[in-house]
Image (spheres, grey):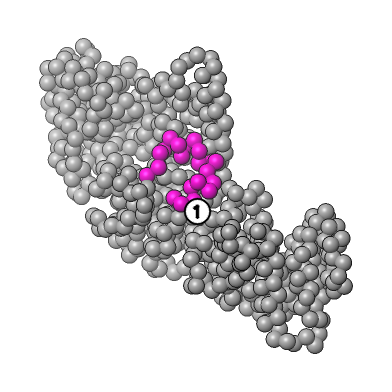
Amino acid sequence: MNTIKFICNYTHIRQIIEDFEKGNYNKKYKILDCGCGCGYGSIILGGLPNSQVIGADIDNEAVTLANLINIERKNVSYVKSSFEGLRDKGYKFDCIVSLETLEHVEAPEKFVKDALKLLNDDGLLIVSIPHWRYHGTDLNSDHVANWSIEKGKKFFSKLFTRYKFFVAEVVDLKDVLNSTFDFKEVNECNYKKVEHMFFICNKRDIKVDNQVVSISRKQKLRILFVNHSVPPYEYTGTPISTYTEMISLQQLGHETAVLIPNKGTSVGPIKEFVNNITIYKVPSLSWGQTFLEDAYFGYNIRNYLSIVEDVIKDFGPDIVHINDYVFMSAKIIELFEAIGLPMVRFVHAMEELCFRTHPFYKDELCNGPETPIKCAKCILKDNYNRNNVFRLRNESNYLCKINARFEYINYLYSKYDAILFMTDKWKEYISKFIKYDKTKSFIVPLGINLSVKREEQIKKTNDVINFVYIGTMAKVKGANLLLDVFSDKEILEKNFTLNIFGVAEDDLQSKIRDVEIISRGKVKYMGPYKKENLSLLLDKKDMGIMPSYSETYSITTRELLYMGIPSIVSDIYGIADIVKDGYNGLVFKTGDFQGLKQKVMMVLKDKSLIDKLKKGAINTSIPTPEDEAKQLENIYLNILSSD
């Protein structure tokens, strides 16, 4: 099939050249067949009247074979050479044909510019590129880049003021012998069946530097967000942050939409408008499977990617902003890159590297994904029988997959145009496990908005110290540690209350009830809360408690500070950047029972300390959603201006 297609493509190219020349063969027409391989294409091009064809390839064996095959055409010859070698020898051509080579080079723009240096002033450059859908890097080990119609047009539009563009569709195997693999206009084809793209450019149409269109700072952008959910479907960390970012950017005049997975979507995408945002729903995938198999996925993920491609075609984004892609495949990142879309990755958590999504398991804090074998053993905890045969079999299986996962994620980070972190300590932590271009990294604090005016005056501390815990009651959030400390006999002798707001994990429900009883009402579980009621819930509260084992930012801590309430917090990344011990809160070592108890006792014994900490809380700078949106806007525009 490939041989038939190959011959047909060169035959069509020969016709294009003939039409361009319009029968003007008064002079020798010099053609370079770049990456000629075994030379069949050069022989076909040599059928043009008065032509002189040189087939060039850097593979010595290919050139040797080409010379052996060519026994007819005296006007066709072959040489082992690069562009530079041909230029050094003084070669000039009227036409350069480069079929299926651009996907093999690391620097395609340099490749094209080097080719142009070998062309006469009115010379023709004809380039073909395979589409990622059928010839992606995951399907061909020799390809170093993925290409699509959008990326190809964007690439050549950057270099030329105009060009001609054709496509060839994939042909069913049963129809191969009857097909001529015709070139088509892009509007005549099914874009999901495009297998090859052909660009015909004239050297006289080269775009000079001052013709490059710059992005206006006032330009309205179309920004596609990616996250595992958004309100009203989920009211947790990244869904709320994503929604806030979208609305804030809309208020700056930009258009936003979000791509989310949805279990109720079997085909798609499904488009809806909810809460003033556009939502595209695509099928939800098994996170465990994608985590372990993403690096291996090929054709089996193409239908899923095709649905995501429909979203891109419908919304037409200028840039993609990825907060997370849980329940989606990491292959969407390769898709965005293949389409030529700039990407911003905002690293909110470490689900990319941790199968359990948090470096924490059964009240045990993990130092992170330090080695594949460590992570393989973690995945296998409680999942399999512990005999040696099963252990070795499953450890080796997961070891290979996790090692591939780590390398694959690092590869994907090389594709991002900007990598954002919420705090310096979070960036420092992630940098232990992911390598990326530090010049593309930025610190962007999340904006806090409680729809109420920020506290400017220190609130009087109550005679009975009122503690508050806000957030999910989960082991990873230090719920067990919190309950253990506030059921301690010495603590219970003091005068205080602790109100707990948030959804509680099922296996913590009974322990919460026990602590309520033991404390004789001092500790009260208040259940879930609504964000719009937060300012009322926090009224007359003196101190927050945040004993988390894993916290990449802790919006809640910042909301408390916004309301003038200091907190006792663990020294985990995400919190330690904002809470300074003795200034706007108290800090204890993560997971340390005695450390948390000591800090609680300090404020119970000294109300003046709380007043001091409240002053620090009021004076702590807390960015707004508008501040965050303006910083994001600036990053987007800088990327698009340099693109």
Residue 329 on image: x %, y %: 45, 45
**Measuring 79% from the left and 81% from the top, which residue is drawn there?**
49
**Residue 352 versus residue 456: which sits nearer the camera?**
352
**Measuring 23% from the left and 39% from the top, which residue is drawn there?**
564
- The relative height of residue 128 versus residue 203 in the rendered view (above or below) is above
Side of 44 where 90 appears, left or right: right
**Residue 467 versus residue 154: which sits nearer the camera?**
154
Residue 241 seen in the current view? no
Residue 351 on image: x %, y %: 43, 37
Residue 7 on image: x %, y %: 70, 66
Q: Disc 1 residue type?
A: Leu
- The relative height of residue 260 versus residue 289 in the rendered view (above or below) is below
Quarter of the image holding residue 362?
Answer: top left
Quarter of the image holding residue 403?
Answer: top right
**Measuring 33% from the left and 49% from the top, which residue is drawn there?**
265
Quarter of the image holding residue 21?
Answer: bottom right
Quadrant housing the N terminus: bottom right
Q: Residue furthest top?
A: 489
Inspect the magenta stretch and tell me whether residue 301 lies in it: yes
Magenta: main secondary structure: helix
- The relative height of residue 282 versus residue 209 in the rendered view (above or below) is above
Can you identify the residue that label 1 sits on? 335
**Residue 64 versus residue 335: which sits nearer the camera?**
64
Residue 501 seen in the current view? yes
Inspect the magenta stretch and tell me whether residue 563 lies in it: no
Residue 109 on image: x %, y %: 64, 63
* Region of the chain picked out in magenta, as a range: 284-304
**How dense is the environment of label 1, judged by Cα within 10 Å: few (below 14), some, or many (20 and up)?**
many
**Residue 473 versus residue 561: which sits nearer the camera?**
473
Q: Considering the numbered disc 1 on the image, is that residue within a helix, a strand or a loop?
A: helix
**Measuring 47% from the left and 15% from the top, which residue is drawn there?**
386
